């Protein structure tokens, strides 16, 4: 007998559609959850420290670093910090 919701393992290509549902569009409207304090807020509402090399987005409630965007000779990269969850509202 087969369970109706059996888990299967496939390669990461299956994530393309799922991730685009969250990441496509205006990134600043995404709502993040801070792993430090549990606060939820749109990325547009975070505090951002920025210079030529990096933009550090901090939780407005507890100031933990949620994520950092780096710009250097390797291109643009995102380092995930205390960002527990990111969702499209
Ligand atoms: Zn926080």
Image: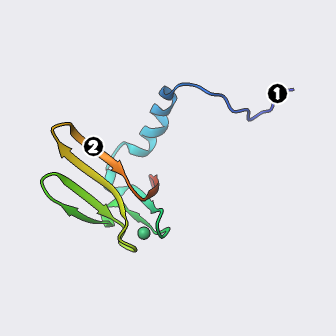
Q: Secondary structure at mark 1?
A: loop
- Residue 37 spot, x, y in % from top left: 48, 70
Colour scheme employed for the rendering of this structure: rainbow
Q: Which residue corresponds to the image point at 37% horizontal and 66% vertical from the top-left?
A: 64
Circle 2 packing at 10 Å, graded few (<14), some (14-19), many (20+), is few
Q: Which residue lies under the disc numbered 1?
A: 2
Give the number of the disc on residue 14: none
Distance (Cα) linking label 1 and label 2: 43 Å
Left or right: where 54 falls relative to 40? left
Q: Which residue corresponds to the image point at 32% horizontal and 67% vertical from the top-left?
A: 45
Quarter-wise, where is residue 10 in the image? top right
Q: Which residue corresponds to the image point at 20% horizontal and 36% vertical from the top-left?
A: 74
Q: Is residue 73 above or below residue 80?
A: above
Q: Residue furthest bottom?
A: 61
Q: Which quarter of the rendered picture does the C terminus lie within?
A: bottom left
Residue contact between numbered discs 1 and 2, judged by CB atoms under 8 Å: no
- Residue 60 spot, x, y in % from top left: 35, 72
Q: Is residue 23 above or below residue 5?
A: below
Task: Tell which quarter ligand 1 is in.
Answer: bottom left
- Residue 5 spot, x, y in % from top left: 74, 35
Residue in the foreground of this view, choosing between 30 and 55 = 55
Q: Which quarter of the rendered picture does the N terminus lie within?
A: top right
């Amino acid at each position: 007998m087969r369970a109706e919701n059996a888990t299967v393992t496939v390669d990461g290509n299956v994530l393309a559609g799922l991730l685009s549902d969250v990441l496509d569009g205006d990134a600043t409207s995404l709502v993040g959850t801070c792993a430090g304090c549990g606060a939820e807020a749109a990325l547009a509402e975070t505090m951002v420290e920025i210079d030529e090399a990096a933009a550090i987005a901090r939780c407005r409630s507890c100031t933990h670093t949620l994520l950092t965007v780096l710009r250097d000779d390797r291109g643009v990269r995102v380092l995930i910090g205390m960002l527990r969850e990111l969702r499209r509202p």
